[in-house]
Amino acid sequence: MSKKNVLMVLFAGFTSVANAADISLVSGLYKNESSKSEGKSTGSTSHFGLKGRFHDDLSENMAWYGIGGLSMTSYSAADGRKSPDNFVGIDIGGGIRHYFKAFAAGVVPFASGGARISNDKEVEYTSTGYIDTTTNGLRYEAAVGIRAGLDENFFAELELPLFDNALFGVRKKVTVVDAVGTTSASESKEETTYSELWVDSTASIVAARVALGYKF
């Protein structure tokens, strides 16, 4: 194959992968967890979440994307105890991507940056009740990755986050003591407002995200 033909293949691979509008599934998850303390059940958690992304071109090398996610979590405490409130989480945002020159036919590296509004909740069951921590705020992030065409319409992405920080956020922590045999539960509440105006560009490969998408 001549040098000219190789360049034509690389360019065709770049345009077929990086260009045109597409949608992708970023995450879909169901999980169930049960907790025990000293051999006795303290509670369980069931979680379902789904997140997707829409992506479209701005130019030959630039694209914008919007991302949306919804999760639902239900909690069940041990018999005779108060259960944490069920939770609905959202993750909505968007950003910009820059595509670099393809290093193989149909495989294109990229860098991206964006912002999103999100909330999250974690519950830790204890021997005397539970600790409920809820966070929400505006986050900013950057990532690098590669997009590879699987066929004419389908593609896969491997994305490695560089950082994911809160421009501003609020963390609320509620500690509930509801030991079996007590007549009522007691609560203590804490609220923290925070901002993370710094960048740690050290990324771990275990944080990599894989997405499957369809181009139309």
Image (spheres, grey):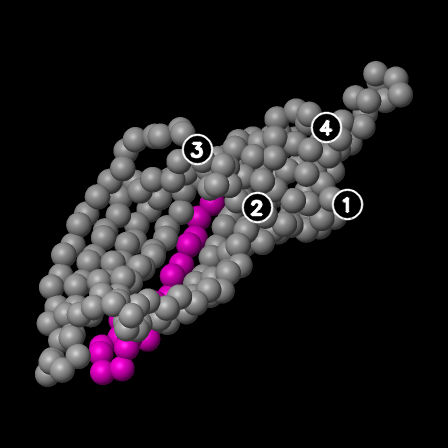
Q: Where residue 208 appears, x then y in whole percent?
A: 51, 41
> In this orientation, does residue 3 appear?
yes
Looking at this view, is 116 or 162 the one in front? Answer: 162
User: Start and end of the magenta stretch?
Assistant: 76-95
Identify the residue at horizontal 17%, vertical 70% (top origin): 128
The numbered mark, 1 or 3, whose residue comes first in the sequence reads 1
Tag 4 residue = 104
Q: Nearer the viewer, mark 3 or mark 4?
A: 3
Tag 3 residue = 203
Secondary structure type for disc 1: loop
Tag 1 residue = 151
* Quadrant location, the N terminus: top right
Give the residue type at disc 4.
Ala
Give the residue type at disc 1.
Asp
Q: CA distance from mark 1 to mark 2?
A: 17 Å
Looking at this view, is 39 or 84 the one in front? Answer: 39
Tag 2 residue = 210
